[in-house]
Amino acid sequence: MGLVVQKYGGSSVADAEGIKRVAKRIVEAKQNGNQVVAVVSAMGDTTDELIDLAEQVSPMPAGRELDMLLTAGERISMALLAMAIKKLGHEAQSFTGSQAGVITDRVHNKARIIDVTPGRIKTSVDEGNIAIVAGFQGVSQDTKDITTLGRGGSDTTAVALAAALDADVCEIYTDVDGVFTADPRVVTKARKIDWISFEDMLELAASGSKVLLHRCVEYARRYNIPIHVRSSFSGLQGTWVSSEPIVQKTQQQGEKQVEQALISGVAHDTSEAKVTVVGVPDKPGEAASIFRTIADAEINIDMVVQNVSAASTGLTDISFTLPKTDGRKAIDALEKNKAGIGFDSLRYDDQIGKISLVGAGMKTNPGVTADFFKALADAGVNIELISTSEIRISVVTRADDVPEAVRAVHSAFGLDSDSDEAVVYGGTGR
Amino acid sequence: MGLVVQKYGGSSVADAEGIKRVAKRIVEAKQNGNQVVAVVSAMGDTTDELIDLAEQVSPMPAGRELDMLLTAGERISMALLAMAIKKLGHEAQSFTGSQAGVITDRVHNKARIIDVTPGRIKTSVDEGNIAIVAGFQGVSQDTKDITTLGRGGSDTTAVALAAALDADVCEIYTDVDGVFTADPRVVTKARKIDWISFEDMLELAASGSKVLLHRCVEYARRYNIPIHVRSSFSGLQGTWVSSEPIVQKTQQQGEKQVEQALISGVAHDTSEAKVTVVGVPDKPGEAASIFRTIADAEINIDMVVQNVSAASTGLTDISFTLPKTDGRKAIDALEKNKAGIGFDSLRYDDQIGKISLVGAGMKTNPGVTADFFKALADAGVNIELISTSEIRISVVTRADDVPEAVRAVHSAFGLDSDSDEAVVYGGTGR
């Protein structure tokens, strides 16, 4: 008998029917001999509706009170889910984040989990109950105020509880069948990935894949909790994210070793913009003063490139990408410090897109980079910025070119679902 | 500087506009130099909507989970109210029942408050904040589960907090101007009562007056907390409920002693039914076995009358009144024990109404009873049952007769608003 932590998102519990369907799935896991803890998000549009109400009374609601308000959302879904499970003849108890021992810092609206003390959850499941836990919320260690975890908070709650309870697996139920080699809305031939390493998944998440957020994968890697991303609608095996390839049991084939492909997938992201600082004196400390300005404005930047200085002027240009939502703030901060930094002008471009190829296999295969650029060139896609890590190559292109670029790369690396197999690289670079 | 506990019902905070209006009123109290704690109910129809959702997933939702669900309602209204107050430039913090230290027994859906430990509220107001507290909810002492207090729970929360905080007054804001000498929907000439004793208010509440519930008044009397019932819309002085007549300050007249009238008011209640147990052997223990059966079914009865036994048969009839909602349960319980109790048949009548005259003055004025019956007789109203206490006379009539009966009694005792003054009784019975 194992302990399974499951997480169901808002789209899985959007209405009474969804809640009943999820209840059945939870009960199945229990009937399979597991102890079950289910983390649940707010129903469908509840959070948006609550934010809308808040804006009606105050355009800039205070963080503490906004958290108090929003946590009503999971309270509703978790209580309903517990009722639906009891209706099916099984014992269930719902718990708020605070009751479940999710201890956070005091940063309202985007708190970080600093400890999990799941004593009540442990007691509840040991007594034979299914424990339902509110995702996305916790209680601050020092003020005892209710906090919310921000984007992807429910996934993180599930992984953190799985770690604290030493669960066998954390199942993330969502509205897609798992993690794909590319976004299936862009690449119709995208394949579901059976297994992916924590590292590759982190790179995909950082590169625009939205199935799992970076934060949640990072937590799972730190505590080595296998994640199983799967559909709450189909019941099919989804994608396993873990440190080592895991052995899957499938009904048709018995045991089957899931192997890691050379390339995990192609991610894309059109949520970023590019800022170019024009006419920066090419001397030590200039870049530092630009990025200190950006950091002080609490903006996370992604890619950075500095052009070769024109010898005649002694001036250079520095470009970086950042979330579009922070664009206004970055421009304002730089303009404010224009004299201190010393530059000519700023250019802002929000019509860019990023395409990333991710796979641990590329570490030892320099040919991957060459093939990646060739695929883009063959598709007529112009590259504006390049950034690489050991297991990822990213390029910035025009936003309009993104769909075609993703399809071209996906196909070139043999990821299309009707390919015979993935491209195999030898030990020699080519 | 005083400490004021205010309570706002669901109709006062039905939408964003209502919340903003209530926020202004709370801020006024603060600006008048008071520390302010505001207890708030769920917005308008929220509770009904949540119950509707619960019924969609489970026809008989578990008490623990229903409480978890329903407490989301006040969470929403209190957070929004705190935001609205902060928007007005004042500091506010919202607290759940649990955070406010409302400790209850573990009877879900109708828990009773057993202790209030308002440490966080005290700290919050001492720091200059306005504290907003969720009404209707608490946390069970032994299980630490969230509970709700049942009907009138928000009023009781307010009074209990006022007692624990040693507040100067508990202001209950509602959608009427105060407590009236009769239901203004029935008696257009009903007058607002300026002051009423706890005892008279308890009798009015027990007799069908819906402005304040019995439970809340009882709590206030035990801890001697003056209650001020008033409109959240008009801002006028309402009705004071306290042990001694209080001195009111009015702008026009300076200080004015509010005196207690002989008769406080006329209450009516059409929510009860009458059960008659026919053909009961007239011997010791028979009535006890009937009311033991009813008590075991957890039904509270109101009035009881036993007819004089017919000497020829040795059989008697026993009638009692009870909430209509418990009628089915009572009949079932009695039928089930028919053999043990020994009776011929049961009669059930849900077309009854009760009219009650309440006033401490009647204790020493036997003429009151005679005038009461005369007023009913003059109005052609037939009396079916009679029950009296030291400060109340109640009669049961046909439900159809209730409006006419209430108007007749109200007028006979000089309570109509265009009367010159209330009827004055001398020391001799008449």
Image (cartoon, coloured by chain):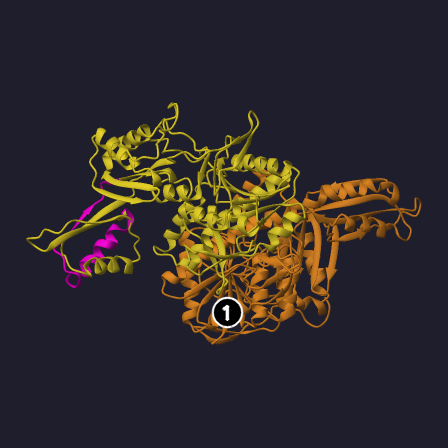
Chain colours: A yellow, B orange
The image quadrant of residue B54 is: top right
Depth order, front residue of B234/B360? B234
Quarter of the image with the C terminus of chain A in it: top left
Report x, y in % for residue A197: 44, 41
Regarding residue B12, the answer to whether it shows in the image is no
Q: Which residues are magenta?
A: A324-353
| Placement of B348 over or under A139, stated as above or below | above
Q: Is residue A301 left or right of residue A90?
A: left
| Placement of B290 over or under A62, stated as above or below | above
Regarding residue A62, the answer to whether it shows in the image is yes
Q: Is residue B4 left or right of residue A385?
A: right
Residue A341 within the segment the image draws in magenta: yes
Q: Is residue B426 left or right of residue B73?
A: right
Going by the picture, which residue comes out furthest to the front? A428
Disc 1 packing (10 Å; few <14; some 14–19; many ≥20): many
Residue B179 within the segment the image draws in magenta: no
Chain under callout 1: B
Report x, y in % for residue A122: 62, 51
The residue where tag 1 is placed is: B4
| Placement of A72 over or under B92, stated as above or below | above
Which amino acid type is marked by label 1?
Val
Report x, y in % for residue B325: 67, 45
